[in-house]
């Protein structure tokens, strides 16, 4: 049985409103923080930096404006991730020896 578009849209809105009232979402205030913002650009900012060095990284566009992560920022992120790799390698080696 197919439901009219309006009915399914209303159901979707009700589900979203209920989901935004979970204790976790109330605590983090993510629905408020991310409302009316470009989620694709925000999600792109969580990606690991690519191997290209010396190049800015296009996170996406919003309201006809491109959002870039500078080459310097991408280089800093690469350094941080290398440090995390070393830390996790040490933890795995410690687990293997204990």
Image: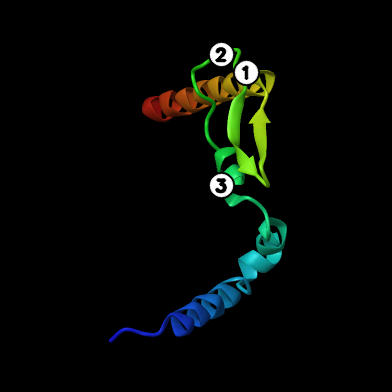
Q: Is residue 86 above or below residue 60?
A: above
SS at badge 1: helix
The residues bearing labels 2 and 1 have C-alpha atoms spaced at a distance of: 7 Å
In the picture of the structure, the residue carrying the numbered disc 2 is: 53
SS at badge 2: loop
Could you tell me which quadrant the N terminus lies in?
Answer: bottom left
Residue 57: % across, % down:
59, 26
Of residue 20 and residue 91, the one placed in the foreground of this image is: 20
- Relative to residue 88, is residue 31 drawn left or right? right
Residues tagged 2 and 1 counted as in contact (Cβ below 8 A): yes
- Front of the two marks 2 and 1: 2
Upstream in sequence: badge 3 or badge 2: 3
In the picture of the structure, the residue carrying the numbered disc 3 is: 40
The residues bearing labels 3 and 1 have C-alpha atoms spaced at a distance of: 22 Å
Residue ID at (52%, 81%) = 10
Check residue 75 in the rendering and tell me which mark sits there, or answer none. 1
Of residue 54 and residue 26, the one placed in the foreground of this image is: 54
Upstream in sequence: badge 2 or badge 1: 2
Q: How busy is the neighbourhood of tag 1: few (under 14 within 10 Å), some, or many (20 plus)? A: some
SS at badge 3: helix
Q: Is residue 24 above or below residue 33?
A: below
Residue ID at (43%, 80%) = 5
The residues bearing labels 3 and 2 have C-alpha atoms spaced at a distance of: 23 Å
Say which quarter of the image contains residue 49: top right
- Relative to residue 87, is residue 76 drawn left or right? right
């Amino acid at each position: 049985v197919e439901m009219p578009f309006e009915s399914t849209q209303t159901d979707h809105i009700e589900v979203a409103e209920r989901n935004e009232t979970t204790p976790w979402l109330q605590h983090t205030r993510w629905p408020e923080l991310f409302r009316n913002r470009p989620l694709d650009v925000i999600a792109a900012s969580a990606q690991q930096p690519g191997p290209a060095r010396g190049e800015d990284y296009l996170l996406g566009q919003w309201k006809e404006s491109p959002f870039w992560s500078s080459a310097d920022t991408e280089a800093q992120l690469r350094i941080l991730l290398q440090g995390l790799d070393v830390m996790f390698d040490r933890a795995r080696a410690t687990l293997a020896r204990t």
